[in-house]
Amino acid sequence: MIKWILSVLSFLISLAFTGTIGFYLAIYLIGPHSDILPEFLHIPVGFILLSIIILIPLLLARKVLVFYKSK
């Protein structure tokens, strides 16, 4: 039971962290007044940022679950 709680907790904390960083990075790179990237790269960069924001917490939660499952 504790392994699931720690796994969910690590997911939520890392999701909050990566979500905050990803939000500001998205505003900086593909925001409404940003001229850093060309227009045709806004959608691919948005998809890449979204997948990174979701993938990092999932991998971290899986690592925590596997670590406590082996004990």
Image (cartoon, helix red, strand yellow):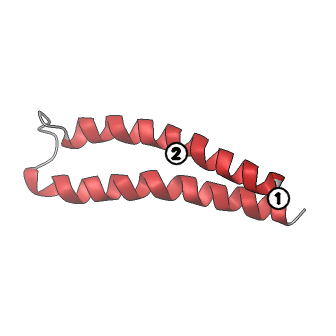
Q: Is residue 63 above or below residue 5?
A: below
Neighbor class of circle 1 (other Cα within 10 Å; few <14, some 14-19, many 20+) is: few
Q: Is residue 55 above or below residue 15?
A: below
Which quadrant is the C terminus positioned in? bottom right
User: What's under tag 2, amino acid-wise?
Assistant: Leu
Which residue is pictured at 11% across the width and 38% down the height?
A: 35
> Residue 45 falls in which quadrant of the image?
bottom left
Q: Which mark is residue 9?
A: none
Neighbor class of circle 2 (other Cα within 10 Å; few <14, some 14-19, many 20+) is: many
Query: From the viewer's perspective, is 21 left or right of 62?
Result: left
**Of the residues under marks 1 and 2, which one precedes in the sequence?**
2
Place of residue 58 in the rendered image (x, y in percent of width and height, measured from the top left) = 56, 58
Place of residue 44 in the rendered image (x, y in percent of width and height, measured from the top left) = 23, 60
Query: From the viewer's perspective, is 24 left or right of 3?
Result: left
Q: Dot 2 corresponds to which residue?
A: 15
**Residue that lies at the very extreme toward the front in this rendered image:** 1
Which residue is pictured at 42% across the width and 37% down the height?
A: 21
User: What's under tag 1, amino acid-wise?
Assistant: Tyr
**Pointer 1 with pointer 2, Cβ within 8 A:** no
Q: Dot 1 corresponds to which residue?
A: 68
Asked whether 37 or 65 is in front, the reply is 65
Which residue is pictured at 35% across the width and 52% down the height?
A: 49
Place of residue 31 in the rendered image (x, y in percent of width and height, measured from the top left) = 19, 38
Place of residue 4 in the rendered image (x, y in percent of width and height, measured from the top left) = 74, 56
Query: From the viewer's perspective, is 71 left or right of 1?
Result: right
- Secondary element at image label 1: helix
